[in-house]
Image (tube, rainbow, N blue to C red):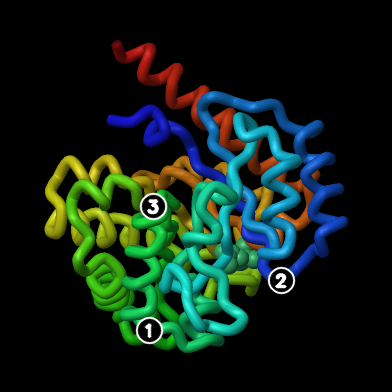
C-alpha cells in the first residue's frame, strides 16, 4: 500500500471565491498556521486563475493543489476551456463530478467519466464526487445514486488506474446548507461506496481507496467526521475560506491520525 493512503486527506474547495491576490495572502497565512505533518495531506483548490501563481509560491511538501474543474479533451478548438494536459505539473489533484458541476452545469456521468480518464492520462489524481439530492434521499435512493455515479464515472478505468482515484461522498443537501449529514447516513453511504468498489475492483481496492466526506464540514464538526468508520479525509467548502478555520480542521486531522497511530501501536 502506498504511504499516501495512510494519510488523512484534507481538501479545501474555495469554489468561485478569493481573487489571485487574496489566494496568495491566504496561502502565506496558512503556511504559517500549520506545519507540514507527515500524516496529513492538505490540498487547496483555488480559482483556476490563481493556480499558476500558487504553484510557484507553495511549498509542495506542505500543500498540494487541485483544479476545481477542467475540460476532458487534451487540446483543440474548445473556446474558454482548460484541459488536464494544461494543468499537468501545476496541480496534483482535480475535483470531478462535484454536485455543482452536475446540477448547475448539467454535467453527465459521461462527462464525469471522460474527466476521470483525462485526469489519469495527465497524471492528476481525480477526486470523484458522488452524492444524492434531498429528494433522492427522501425516496431512499441514496445507495442507487451512489451506485450509478460510481459506475458512470469509473467505466473503463482499470484496476491499476483506480489506485490513483479518490472518492468523495458529498450529499447534495448538505453542501453549503449548514445541514450536517449524521454519522449513520455517512457510514451507510461510505459502506455502499466501498461495497461497489469491491464489486468493481476487489476487496483490496475497496479497503485501500481513500474516501472523503464533504458537506458543511466546520472546524467544530471535522473531528466527528474524521473518526467515522471508512472516512479517510474531508472535502471542505465554506469553512476552508478562512485560513484560521481551515488550519483548525488540519490540526484536528493530525490529532486524529496521531490517536489512530497510537492505537495501532498499542495493539501491535
Ligand atoms: P461546503 O462545500 O463545505 O461549503 O458545504 C463542500 C463542497 O462543496 O465540496
> Looking at the image, is mark 2 or mark 1 earlier in the sequence?
2
Image spot of residue 156 (x, y percent): 19, 66
User: Quick one: label 1, few (<14), some, or many (20+) residues within 10 Å?
Assistant: some
User: Quick one: label 2, few (<14), some, or many (20+) residues within 10 Å?
Assistant: few
> Looking at the image, is mark 3 or mark 2 earlier in the sequence?
2
Quadrant (top left/top right/bottom left/bottom right) for the N terminus: top left
Image point (46%, 33%), residue name: 7
Q: Is residue 133 left or right of residue 253?
A: left
> Looking at the image, is mark 3 or mark 1 earlier in the sequence?
1
In the displayed image of the protein, which residue is found farthest to the front? Answer: 76
Image point (45%, 17%), residue name: 262
* Mark number displayed over residue 108: 1
| Label 3 beta carbon less than 8 Å to ligand 1 | no
Residue for badge 3: 166
SS under mark 3? strand
Q: Are marks 3 and 1 in contact (CB under 8 Å)?
A: no
Image spot of residue 225 (x, y percent): 50, 49
Image point (42%, 87%), residue name: 135
The residue lying toward the viewer, choosing from 159 and 190, is 159
Residue for badge 2: 16
SS under mark 1? loop
Q: Is residue 233 left or right of residue 139?
A: right
Image point (61%, 56%), residue name: 236
**Whether residue 143 is situated above or below residue 89 in the rendered picture:** below
Q: Are marks 2 and 1 in contact (CB under 8 Å)?
A: no
Q: Quadrant of residue 37?
A: top right
Give me the C-alpha separation between circle 3 and circle 2.
Answer: 22 Å
Give me the C-alpha separation between circle 3 and circle 1.
Answer: 19 Å
The residue lying toward the viewer, choosing from 169 and 19, is 19
Image spot of residue 226 (x, y percent): 49, 43
Image spot of residue 46 (x, y percent): 68, 58
Q: Quadrant of residue 163?
A: top left
Amino acid at each position: 500500500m502506498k504511504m499516501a493512503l495512510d494519510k488523512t486527506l484534507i481538501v479545501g474547495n474555495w469554489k468561485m471565491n478569493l481573487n489571485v491576490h487574496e489566494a496568495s495572502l491566504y496561502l502565506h497565512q496558512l503556511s504559517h498556521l500549520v506545519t507540514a505533518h507527515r500524516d496529513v495531506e492538505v490540498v487547496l483548490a483555488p480559482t483556476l486563475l490563481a493556480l499558476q501563481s500558487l504553484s510557484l509560491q507553495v511549498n509542495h511538501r506542505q500543500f498540494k493543489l487541485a483544479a476545481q474543474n477542467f475540460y476532458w479533451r487534451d487540446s483543440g478548438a474548445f473556446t474558454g476551456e482548460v484541459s488536464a494536459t494544461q494543468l499537468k505539473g501545476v496541480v496534483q489533484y482535480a475535483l470531478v463530478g462535484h454536485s455543482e458541476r452536475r446540477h448547475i452545469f448539467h454535467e453527465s456521468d459521461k462527462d464525469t467519466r471522460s474527466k476521470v480518464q483525462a485526469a489519469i492520462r495527465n497524471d492528476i489524481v481525480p477526486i470523484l464526487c458522488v452524492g444524492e439530492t434531498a429528494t433522492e434521499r427522501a425516496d431512499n435512493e441514496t445507495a442507487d445514486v451512489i451506485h450509478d455515479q460510481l459506475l458512470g464515472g469509473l467505466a473503463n478505468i482499470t484496476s491499476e488506474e483506480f489506485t490513483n482515484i479518490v472518492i468523495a461522498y458529498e450529499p447534495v443537501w448538505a453542501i453549503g446548507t449548514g445541514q450536517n449529514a449524521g454519522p449513520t447516513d455517512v457510514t451507510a453511504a461510505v459502506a455502499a461506496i466501498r461495497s461497489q468498489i469491491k464489486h468493481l475492483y476487489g476487496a483490496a481496492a475497496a479497503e485501500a481507496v481513500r474516501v472523503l466526506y464533504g458537506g458543511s464540514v466546520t472546524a467544530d464538526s471535522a473531528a466527528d467526521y474524521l473518526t467515522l468508520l471508512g472516512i479517510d479525509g474531508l472535502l471542505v467548502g465554506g469553512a476552508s475560506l478562512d485560513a484560521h478555520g481551515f488550519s483548525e480542521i488540519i490540526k484536528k486531522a493530525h490529532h486524529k491520525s496521531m490517536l489512530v497511530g497510537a492505537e495501532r501501536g498499542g495493539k501491535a
